[in-house]
Amino acid sequence: MKKLILAFALLLSVVSFAQKKQTWKVDNYHSFLNFSIKHLGVSFVDGNFKSYEGTLEMDGDKIETGSFNFVVDANSINTGIEARDNHLKSADFFDTASFGKITFVSKSIKKITKNNYILIGDLTIKNVTKKVTFNLVYGGKAANDGYGNEKLGFQATTKINRFDFGVAYDPTGAAVGKEVNLQINLEFAKAK
């Protein structure tokens, strides 16, 4: 009898743990995947990716238990200049004909201060995967966005070296900078 009660209690704790995990889906209308890169060493070119899917899974409100998973359509790169965007899609840069997806899978989230975290994960560009560390700021939670949706917000920033991912056009970095600043503004809706 004791074994049966123990097994039942264990089952309840597993079910309870599984029920705590919540899935949040990125709200593409209120999220932005932005980048900025130096041009000729004197100015910056800004751009973004227009097409992507992403989820966040976490236990309740515990950000540290979160897991981000994103897939970005590399063909959706946008700098506002069609000729430049086409060049960025070519083999000189992202080679989107061969490598159409950019992915990010988080590995850990560590709390630093009240709303500031360190997000570490694997970023894959052109089939090259590297560990990337983001500064993650939790913007807060809205119980109702006016349409009955619960929302969460974040901003993630980091700097990567494009050469680490095989994006090696202009090897001197004189015309197109080597470092790319990423600013990712995210809003998630709780999955129903």
Image (cartoon, helix red, strand yellow):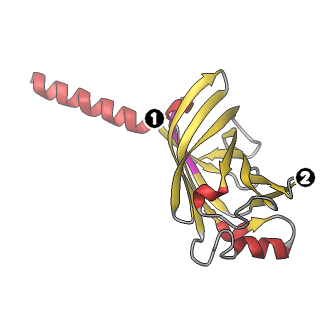
Residue 142 is drawn in which quadrant?
top right
User: What residue is at 64 percent from the left and 21 percent from the top?
Assistant: 113
User: What residue is at 57 percent from the left and 71 percent from the top?
Assistant: 99
Rendered view: 151 above or below 125: above
Q: Nearer the viewer, mark 1 or mark 2?
A: 2
Please tell me whether the stretch drawn in magenta is mainly helix, strand or loop. strand
Residue at the limit of the structure toward the left, as seen here: 1
Residue 119 place in picture, x, y as percent: 58, 37
Residue 136 located left or right of residue 175? left
Rendered view: 160 above or below 120: below
Residue type, numbered disc 1:
Lys
Instruction: Tell me the quadrant of the picture where the N terminus can be found.
Output: top left
Residue highlighted by disc 2: 42
Asked whether the viewer can see residue 57, the reply is yes
Residue 9 place in picture, x, y as percent: 25, 27
Residue 51 place in picture, x, y as percent: 69, 64
Q: Is residue 186 magenta?
A: no
Write the start and end of the magenta stretch as one range: 55-59
Residue 21 located left or right of residue 8? right
Residue 56 is drawn in which quadrant?
top right
Residue at disc 1, secondary structure: helix
User: What residue is at 53 percent from the left and 51 percent from the top?
Assistant: 130
Q: Residues within 10 Å of mark 1 (few under 14, many from 20)?
A: few
Residue highlighted by disc 1: 20
Marks 1/2: CA–CA distance: 50 Å
Residue at disc 2, secondary structure: loop
